[in-house]
Amino acid sequence: MPRGPVAARKMVVTVFNLLKTSEPVPPFNQYFASEQNMDMQQRRFYRYWLDSWSHGQALDVQGNISYLFCYVYTVLACPPEKAASELDRLTRNYHQEAKFIEYCRVWLSDCYVLMGE
């Protein structure tokens, strides 16, 4: 499999074109989600989602909240101030994903305790 910036760009373009045609998000429902649990199509979408998120765009995961949990597990490893900021941003952008929001609010509360607030 080709690697490097050109291959990565082609992968992002491929996923973008897939999403532009209103194709559904690849299903991903996994407890304790991680990239290791993803197949190639799921990983492509996740990396596209991550790139979009890092550029300020929240893509619809169409109920596949395991993608969001996968990201959140990396966020929880950050210092509480940074984690709280990301958790707040996630809750604002994914308010329609009720189960995900429940967990985020608990973790956000934990961050505030750790920050002494």
Image (spheres, rainbow, N blue to C red):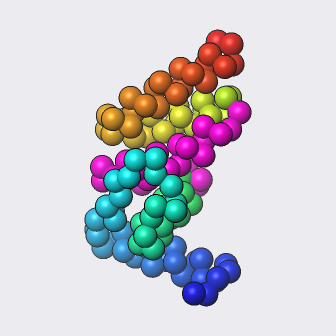
Residue 104 in view here: yes
Residue 52 in view here: no
- Residue drawn at the location 65% of the way across and 39% of the way down: 77
Decide whether residue 47 is among the magenta residues: no
Number of callouts in the render?
0
The quarter in which the N terminus is drawn is bottom right
Q: Looking at this rendering, what residue extends furthest in the top direction?
A: 117
Q: Is residue 77 left or right of residue 69?
A: right
Q: Position of residue 10 (x, y in %)?
A: 54, 81
Q: Position of residue 95 (x, y in %)?
A: 36, 35
Q: Nearer the viewer, residue 54 or 35?
A: 35
Query: Quadrant of the rendered structure where residue 22 is?
Result: bottom left
Q: Is residue 64 left or right of residue 13?
A: left
Query: Quadrant of the rendered structure where residue 59 is?
Result: bottom left
- Residue drawn at the location 57% of the way across and 22% of the way down: 110
Q: Nearer the viewer, residue 83 or 88?
A: 83
- Residue drawn at the location 45% of the way across and 73% of the way down: 40
The quarter in which the C terminus is drawn is top right
Q: Looking at this rendering, what residue extends furthest in the bottom direction?
A: 2
Decide whether residue 67 is among the magenta residues: yes
Residue bounds of the magenta highlight: 54-79
Q: Position of residue 81 (x, y in %)?
A: 68, 29
- Residue drawn at the location 60% of the way across and 30% of the way down: 84
Above or below 58: residue 42 = below
Q: Is residue 34 left or right of residue 76?
A: left
Q: Position of residue 16 (x, y in %)?
A: 44, 71
Q: Is residue 108 left or right of residue 63?
A: right
